[in-house]
């Protein structure tokens, strides 16, 4: 796991977390240490719009640490701060696309129940530039469960 933080005057003002897939996740079967969930990114309300989220993402992805891995983020609407952001659902979703897209994340289609719960939810995935082809194939095979219709 990894946690990056931004602080001001000794006060935590932003964070970014990475962790292995949860045990009951469909991605938990993939090789440990080769797939990570970007589990959270948050900036204090009064400091949003200053680029802190981008700075944390820059810090995380400027090193080669994740170049041989897959990192995914489940952008779930029930975690979004729509009220505090002043953005509607479409605006918040677009903000997620822009932030994550700048670091190589792309949306993927899945039948994962938490993602499918709300059509605004997203699965955003970054395939590291040196991620082994076998790992990428294993990951893609988990997106739609066999016997399910998407």
Image (cartoon, grey):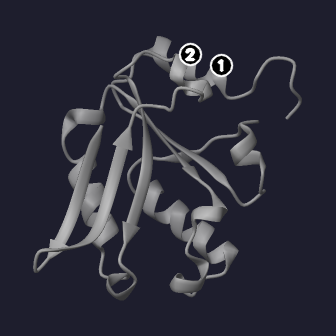
Q: Would residue 62 appear left or right of 91 to someone viewing this image?
A: left
Q: Secondary structure at mark 1?
A: helix
As drawn, 124 above or below 80: above
Give the camera-side residue of 29 and 132.
Answer: 29
Residue at 26 percent of width and 60 percent of height: 56
Tell me which residue sits at (59%, 27%) in the image. Answer: 24
> Residue 12, located in which quarter of the rendered image?
bottom left
* Pick the front one: 42 or 54: 42
Q: Which image quarter is the C terminus in?
A: top right
26 versus 104 height, above or below? above
Residue placed under numbered mark 1 in the picture: 141
Q: Which residue is mark 2?
A: 138
Rate crowding at label 1 as few (under 14), some (14 to 19) or many (20 or more) other CA atoms within 10 Å.
few
Residue 46 drawn at (x, y percent): 35, 88
Up the image or down, 6 lies above or below 118; here it is below
The 10 Å Cα crowd at callout 2, few under 14, some 14 to 19, many 20 or more, is: some
Number of numbered callouts drawn? 2
Q: Are marks 1 and 2 in contact (CB under 8 Å)?
A: yes
Residue shown at 57% from the left, 68% from the top? 80
Of residue 117 and residue 97, the one placed in the foreground of this image is 117
């Amino acid at each position: 796991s990894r946690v990056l933080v931004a602080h001001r005057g000794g006060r935590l003002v932003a964070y970014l977390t990475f962790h292995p897939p949860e045990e009951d996740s469909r991605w938990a079967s993939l090789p440990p240490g080769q797939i990570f969930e970007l589990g959270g990114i948050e900036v204090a309300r009064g400091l949003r719009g200053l680029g802190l989220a981008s700075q944390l993402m820059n810090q995380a992805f400027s090193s080669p640490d994740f170049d041989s891995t897959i990192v995914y983020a489940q952008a779930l609407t029930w975690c979004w701060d729509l009220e505090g952001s002043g953005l509607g659902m479409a605006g918040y979703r677009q903000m997620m696309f822009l932030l994550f897209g700048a670091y190589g994340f792309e949306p993927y289609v899945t039948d994962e129940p938490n993602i499918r719960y709300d059509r605004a939810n997203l699965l955003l995935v970054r395939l590291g530039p040196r991620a082994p082809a076998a790992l990428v194939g294993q990951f893609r095979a988990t997106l739609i469960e066999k016997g399910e219709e998407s």
